[in-house]
Amino acid sequence: MSAQPVITVQPQFSVAQQPGHWQTGMMDCCSDCGVCLCGAFCYPCLSCQVAGDMNECFLCGSTVAMRTLYRTKYNIPGSIMGDYCAVWWCTPCAVCQLKRDINRRREMGIFW
């Protein structure tokens, strides 16, 4: 009888994710005035829309965790501290940016 070879190393398949980017800047309100008007005059509604788009609790739309989750999902460079600063100093702008990004990725067919 001949001995069967023992495989000790399995071939691996990995796909390196390319760094992503935000579709719009934090202060890029003119790119989608509807989102910015909603953020300015009915911020809680916009926050709920973002949370709903991401299948999260309606209270989570404007949190640092939501922004970090989104950034991580799309491999957008940044840090939790950067997310914290964006949400702390300009919450409506941060949520508007997130909503614009969701809308653009949805139009491109790449929104999860």
Image (cartoon, rainbow, N blue to C red):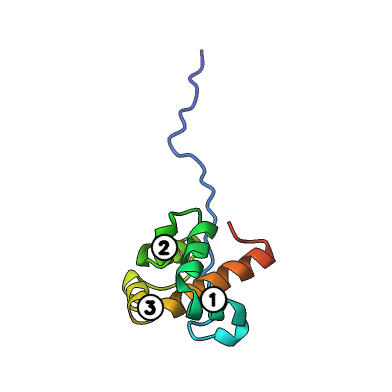
Q: Residue furthest top?
A: 1
Mark identifier at residue 66: 2
Whether residues under marks 3 and 2 lie with C-beta atoms below 8 angstroms apart, the answer is no
Q: Position of residue 84 (x, y in %)?
A: 33, 73
Compare marks 1 and 2 and give the one earlier in the sequence.
1
Separation (CA) of disc 1 from disc 2: 19 Å
Q: Residue at x 48, y 63 (%)?
A: 48
In this image, 79 relative to 19: left or right? left
Amino acid carrying mark 3 in the image: Ala
* Of the pair 46 and 23, the residue shown nearer to us: 46
Q: Amino acid at mark 1?
A: Cys
Residue density around tag 2, few if under 14, some if 14–19, many if 20 or more, within 10 Å:
some
Q: Residue under label 1, please give it.
A: 38
Q: Nearer the viewer, mark 3 or mark 1?
A: 1
Query: Can you identify the residue that label 3 sits on?
Result: 86
Seen in the image, is 26 located left or right of residue 102? left
Comparing 2 with 9, the one in front is 9
Where is residue 5 drawn, in percent x and y? 49, 27
- Assign a secondary structure to mark 2: helix
Residue drawn 34% across the image and 69% down it = 80
Q: Residue at x 48, y 60 (%)?
A: 51
> Hey, what amino acid is under mark 2?
Met
Say if residue 97 shows up in the picture.
Answer: yes
Instruction: Estimate how packed mark 1 is, as few (under 14), some (14 to 19) or many (20 or more) residues with alpha carbons within 10 Å.
Output: some
Residue 29 vertical placement versus 104 (above, below): below
Label 3 and label 2: CA atoms lie apart by 12 Å
Q: Secondary structure at mark 1?
A: helix
In the rendered view, tell whether residue 40 sits above or below residue 61.
below
> Mark 1 against mark 2, which lies toward the viewer?
1
